[in-house]
């Protein structure tokens, strides 16, 4: 959530009975190895500044990635990322949460590379019960290759909020009352990866990866995790309802945040599955709430 709201809520949450944690005024940056481990191609991960910053490397042989040591049911998760610079067509830099079984839940940031001079596309998606098809795409209002920016997910029983530098770019509300599944009982690990997807990532696969520009490098720091850590088979969090992200202030956006979200919608959104009648002649029920934003 926006930092000013967190600050306003701090004192109230510290005093509330039974509340065992409160949001930090800003994400706490910790070394990579405290919460994460590499998942494959270990030699394609480079470490800097005592492990507080890493780089993922993609070449014609392989990409690479990492995952959290723990699994989580709800919380706030963020990463400072600097995207692949230059000609990044065909590459995908991903930051996401995912459960572990075939009917998995998933919350996705996917950054789709492009030809030099063309903007990155940020695609978000939500999977429930193994089914996605809820893509939204935006252009960013800055060049994500020039410096680090913060990409965050707030996930609780009420909503999933995707944020870029504390600006909400998407809200996926809990619409179980409309018969729409919502991630609530499958613990998720946090993942990030850099990989080649030139069969679809850039202009639907028309633009292929130029391997003469390899290696491609995405940089990371600020490995912030503030979630309810549970076993991979847990169905609920024992402190459900008591953590800061469960409190009333985080069950919906405030008026300022909705204005920022509408700004993103009006100026930077280039695709919303709710408006795609070719793919979905009958929109999914949650799209009514999406249109009301």
Image: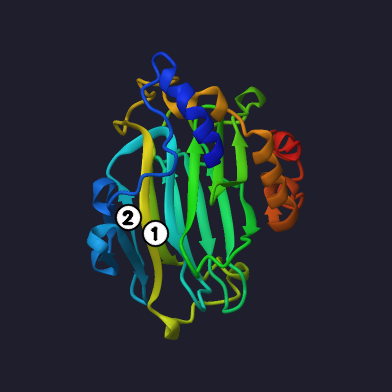
Can residue 1 be seen here? The reply is no
Quarter of the view holding residue 175: top right
Write the residue at 29% across / 68% down.
Answer: 44
Quarter of the view holding residue 43: bottom left
Comes first in the chain, label 1 or label 2: 2
How many neighbours does mark 1 have within 10 angstroms: few (below 14), some (14-19), or many (20 or more)? many
Q: How is the image coloured?
A: rainbow
Please tell me whether residue 293 is drawn above or below residue 78 in the rendered image: above
Discs 1, 2 touching: Cβ within 8 Å: yes
Give residue 288's position: percent from left, percent from top: 74, 35
Mark 2 element type: strand
Quarter of the view holding residue 63: bottom left
Residue 230, label in figure: none
Q: From the image, which quarter does the N terminus lie in?
A: top right
Q: What number of labels is visible?
A: 2
Please tell me whether residue 271 is drawn above or below residue 72 in the rendered image: below
Left or right, residue 172 beside residue 72: right
Write the residue at 32% across / 61% down.
Answer: 53
In front here: 262 or 216?
A: 262
Give residue 184's position: percent from left, percent from top: 47, 29
Can residue 167 be seen here? The reply is yes
Residue matched to label 2? 66
Write the residue at 38% across / 60% down.
Answer: 220
Write the residue at 25% across / 59% down.
Answer: 51
In front here: 108 or 46?
A: 46
Left or right, residue 138 beside residue 62: right
Residue matched to label 1? 193
């Amino acid at each position: 959530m926006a930092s000013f709201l967190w600050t306003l809520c701090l004192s109230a949450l510290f005093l509330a009975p039974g509340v065992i944690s409160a949001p930090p005024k800003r994400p706490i940056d910790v070394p990579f190895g405290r919460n994460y481990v590499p998942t494959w191609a270990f030699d394609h991960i480079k470490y800097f500044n005592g492990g507080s910053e890493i780089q993922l490397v993609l070449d014609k042989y392989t990409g690479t990635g990492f995952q959290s040591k723990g699994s989580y049911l709800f919380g706030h998760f963020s990463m400072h990322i600097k995207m692949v610079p230059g000609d990044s067509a065909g590459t995908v830099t991903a930051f996401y949460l995912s459960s572990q079984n075939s009917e998995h839940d998933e919350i996705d940031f996917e950054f789709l590379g492009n030809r030099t001079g063309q903007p990155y596309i940020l695609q978000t998606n939500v999977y429930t019960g193994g089914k996605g098809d809820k893509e939204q795409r935006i252009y960013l209002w800055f060049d994500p290759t020039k410096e680090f920016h913060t990409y965050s997910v707030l996930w609780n029983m009420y909503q999933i909020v995707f944020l870029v530098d504390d600006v909400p770019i998407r809200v996926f509300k809990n619409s179980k009352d409309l018969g729409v599944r919502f991630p609530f009982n499958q613990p998720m690990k946090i993942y990030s990866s850099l990989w080649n997807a030139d069969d679809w990532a850039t202009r639907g696969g028309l633009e292929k990866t130029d391997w003469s520009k390899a290696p491609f490098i995405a940089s990371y720091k600020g490995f912030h995790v503030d979630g309810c850590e549970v076993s991979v088979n847990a169905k609920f969090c024992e402190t459900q309802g008591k953590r800061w992200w469960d409190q009333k202030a985080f069950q919906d956006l405030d008026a300022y945040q909705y204005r920022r979200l509408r700004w993103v919608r009006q100026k930077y959104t280039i695709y919303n599955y709710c408006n795609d009648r070719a793919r979905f002649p009958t929109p999914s029920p949650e799209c009514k709430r999406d249109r009301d934003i």
